[in-house]
Amino acid sequence: MNKINLSDSEWKIMKVLWTHSPCTLKDIVTELEGETGWTKATVFTMLKRLIAKDAVTMEDDGSHHQYSPAISRKDAAITETASFLSRVYDGSVGLMISALTSRQSLSEEDIAELHKILDEAEKKQRG
């Protein structure tokens, strides 16, 4: 898995591509215009950066360029989560979970999901 760090703006474009791929530049601008107000030039510049990062691919179909994600949303989220965990909590999952749970109460479903995640992690660790 490539470790590609995405800016907040790049995440917006990637979300469009993960949902509606392949897309033309116009498709992306149209999808984001209400939320961001970005011009065609702005989106094009960000697409060039994403291509340089190997996060997006571009195909020429003869009349338009078609953009597609080159990384999965899951891989991008894993990289972002690891980066966040390292920066904010010095790599401590326990500190992060403690901070999250101290600010809000967890539903029974949240607690059950956390138990399931921890059980699966424990099984993986045991082999």
Image: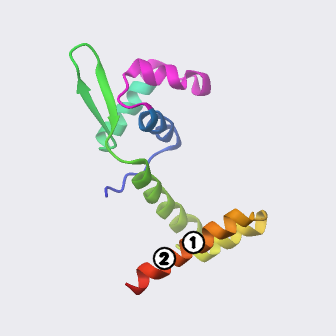
Quarter of the image for residue 90 reads: bottom right
Quarter of the image for residue 85 reads: bottom right
Q: Position of residue 100 (x, y in %)?
A: 69, 65
Secondary structure at badge 1 equals helix
Q: Nearer the viewer, residue 105 or 32?
A: 105
- Name the mark nearer the viewer: 1 or 2: 1
Residue range (magenta): 20-41
Principal secondary structure, stretch drawn in magenta:
helix
Would you say the residues marked 1 and 2 are in contact, meaning their CB atoms lie under 8 Å apart? no
Q: Which residue is mark 2?
A: 121
Q: Which residue is mark 1?
A: 116
Q: Position of residue 112 (x, y in %)?
A: 65, 69
Amino acid type for the residue under numbered disc 1: Lys
Residue lying at 39% horizontally and 28% vertically, measured from the top left = 45
Q: CA distance from mark 1 to mark 2?
A: 9 Å
Q: Nearer the viewer, residue 6 or 75?
A: 75
Left or right side of 101 for 88: left
Residue lying at 31% horizontally and 55% vertically, measured from the top left = 2
Residue lying at 45% horizontally and 59% vertically, measured from the top left = 78
Left or right side of 57 for 127: right
Secondary structure at badge 2 equals helix
Residue 96 appears in view: no
Q: Residues within 10 Å of mark 2 (few under 14, many from 20)?
A: few
Quarter of the image for residue 40 reads: top left
Amino acid type for the residue under numbered disc 2: Ala
Q: Position of residue 67 (x, y in %)?
A: 33, 29
Left or right side of 119 for 27: left
